[in-house]
Image: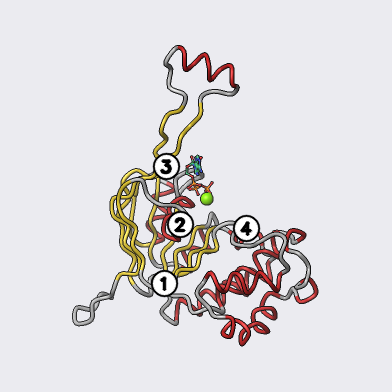
Amino acid sequence: MPRTSEAILPRIIVDDVHKDFKLRHTHSIKETFVAAIKRKPLTTDFHALDGITFEIGEGEAVALLGFNGSGKSTMLKLISGVLTPDQGKVLTRGRVAGLIEVGAGFHPDLSGRENIYLNAAILGMSKKETEARYEQIVAFSEIEKFIDTEVKHYSSGMFLRLAFSVAIHTEVDVLLIDEILSVGDEPFQRKCLARIRELHSQGKTLVVVSHDLGMVTSLCERGILLRDGKVLFDGSSADAVAAMRA
Ligand SMILES: Nc1ncnc2c1ncn2[C@@H]1O[C@H](COP(=O)(O)OP(=O)(O)OP(=O)(O)O)[C@@H](O)[C@H]1O
Ligand SMILES: [Mg+2]
């Protein structure tokens, strides 16, 4: 329910955002040379995001929906600051934690323990704060046995366990989750979802990307549907799923 006396402050503002990627048309040096001589374009611009505008308020849980290649991961990377827009603005308020790619933000040659400190530092925690929460982080991840192993030997699920565990034990205001939960086994997924719901009930802002439409509609009240880099629908998550299937 929108409250008139106490306006909900925005956490994320995405204003007319464009992101292009280059598509290559040549496969070899010879082809590149021939194309250059013939003055044929070597690449064309592909509009991954083509004028996206939306605002996400404090405490909202939003599902970012769309088929493969519609621009969801690109959008999350722009919100997390991993990518910058070619045009338009992305503004965020507060600490943003992104669980976007399996293994992203980890240094392969460092152990799980060292990566906990590294990740927590990236999320703005001091060494002391991390030390105080270290035991809890490891306990939630359930990978104590491998904590001193270099993470290059970790499985996808182990990366998820550590990244998720660090993110939820830091003081984040916005949590971005891209499909990464799907590499967790069922018990861990259930534990993560319970924790995500808890964070939502504490007023944290969530943006979730998943092809598990049942899960995201139950978790998120709002859905933003992307198609070909544009916003096709923005409303209730149930209606967004219906629009996706239409
Ligand atoms: N670094 C890049 N270089 C070139 N093209 C890219 C790059 N990143 C994304 N793209 C292209 O942008 C489009 C959108 O990709 P994106 O990963 O955002 O889709 P998505 O909605 O997350 O899809 P999925 O459901 O498969 O995860 C795709 O066509 C993809 O090929
Ligand atoms: Mg994606």
On the image, the x and y values in percent for residue 202 come to 44, 82
Q: Nearer the viewer, residue 115 or 191?
A: 115
Image quarter of residue 154: bottom right
Residue located 48% across and 32% down the image: 23
What whole-number distance in Å separates the C-alpha atoms at marks 4 and 1?
21 Å
Q: CA distance from mark 2 to mark 1?
A: 13 Å
Q: How is the image coloured?
A: secondary structure
| Pointer 1 residue | 205
Is mark 3 in CB contact (under 8 Å) with mark 4? no
Of marks 3 and 1, which one's residue comes earlier in the chain? 3
- Looking at marks 4 and 2 on the same chain, the residue that comes earlier in the sequence is marked by 2
Please name the residue shown 45% across and 61% down the image. Answer: 80
What distance separates the C-alpha of mark 3 from that of mark 4?
Answer: 21 Å
Circle 4 residues within 10 Å: few <14, some 14–19, many ≥20:
some
Quadrant of the snapshot with the C terminus: top left
Q: Amino acid at mark 1?
A: Thr
On residue 76, which mark appears? 2
First in sequence: mark 4 vs mark 1: 4
Element type at mark 2: helix
Mark 2 / mark 1, whichever is N-terminal: 2
Q: Is residue 107 above or below residue 49?
A: below
SS label for mark 3: strand
Task: Name the front one of labels 2 and 1.
Answer: 2
Q: Is mark 3 within 8 Å of ligand 1?
A: yes
